[in-house]
Image (cartoon, helix red, strand yellow):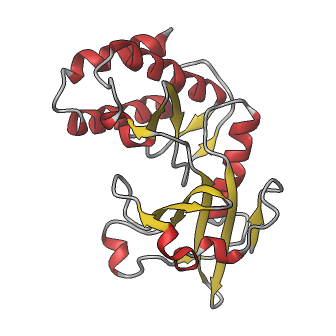
Amino acid sequence: MLLRNPAFPAATAQWLQPGFWGEQARPVAVGGRGGAWFVHSDAGEFVLRQYLRGGLVARLSRASYLFTGYRRSRAIAEFRLLQQLRELGLPVPEPVAALVCRRGLWRYRAAILLRRIAGASPLPEAPGMDDALLWQRTGQMLRAFHDAGLDHVDLNCDNILVADGALWLIDFDRCRLRPASREDKPWKRRNLARLRRSVSKRCQGVAWPVLWAGLLEGYRR
């Protein structure tokens, strides 16, 4: 099953295969489990990501998942979620296409293609990443997502991008929209706790506890 953004009528299933792009595709070096490429083409600048397992289960099957219906597949679910978030005016990448390939009766593989955010860097590598104002703005952005009901199960600092001063959130695999609410919720606290752990590991070269306090200040506003 191929799900395609109407803004990209030329997209085919081949677009979701890194080999199709040849030298126009180069692996993404930062974050994730591998299986992601930057694509430079006449059609645009894209990020291609294949869904891969991590942990012990990857020893059994690195790229295959249990099939319980196309709508529940990881790629289709993430594509739909990105559409919803964009309709809410939140800063997320534009989905281009999602592909689900059956493997027998019970297994599938999947990939998603996104429009690349020009000039973007992960927060730990962004110019001026030690700017307190940047971290306050990051907190404000995260609060907007939480108020909209986004439960980001893999919220880490490499999934926060900075591009020309603008902030973006990426990687929504297994994430979900809960009922919108400004109230404090356990899932919101779990998101922030996961982010704090990643900041403590990835931002060792700066006074990250001070910057984290600024993020929380922005979040609470």
Q: Which quadrant would the N terminus be assigned to in this image?
A: bottom right
Q: Position of residue 198 (x, y in %)?
A: 29, 39
Residue 72 sits above or below residue 78 on the image: below
Q: Quadrant of residue 103?
A: bottom right
Q: Quadrant of residue 117?
A: top right
Rendered residue at 40%/10% (across/down): 217
Q: Is residue 41 left or right of residue 34?
A: right
Residue 160 sits above or below residue 82 on the image: above
Q: How many marks?
A: 0
Relative depth, front residue between 57 and 45: 45
Relative depth, front residue between 118 and 149: 118
Residue 98 sits above or below residue 211 on the image: below
Rendered residue at 24%/39% (across/down): 202
Residue lying at the far front in this picture: please name it.
42
Q: Position of residue 87 (x, y in %)?
A: 76, 36
Q: Quadrant of residue 77?
A: bottom right
Q: Is residue 121 left or right of residue 176?
A: left
Q: Is residue 53 left or right of residue 148?
A: left
Q: Is residue 53 left or right of residue 64?
A: left
Q: Position of residue 29 (x, y in %)?
A: 34, 57
Residue lying at the far bottom in this picture: please name it.
104
Rendered residue at 58%/78% (across/down): 20
Rendered residue at 61%/39% (across/down): 92
Q: Position of residue 3 (x, y in %)?
A: 76, 65
Residue 53 sits above or below residue 196 on the image: below
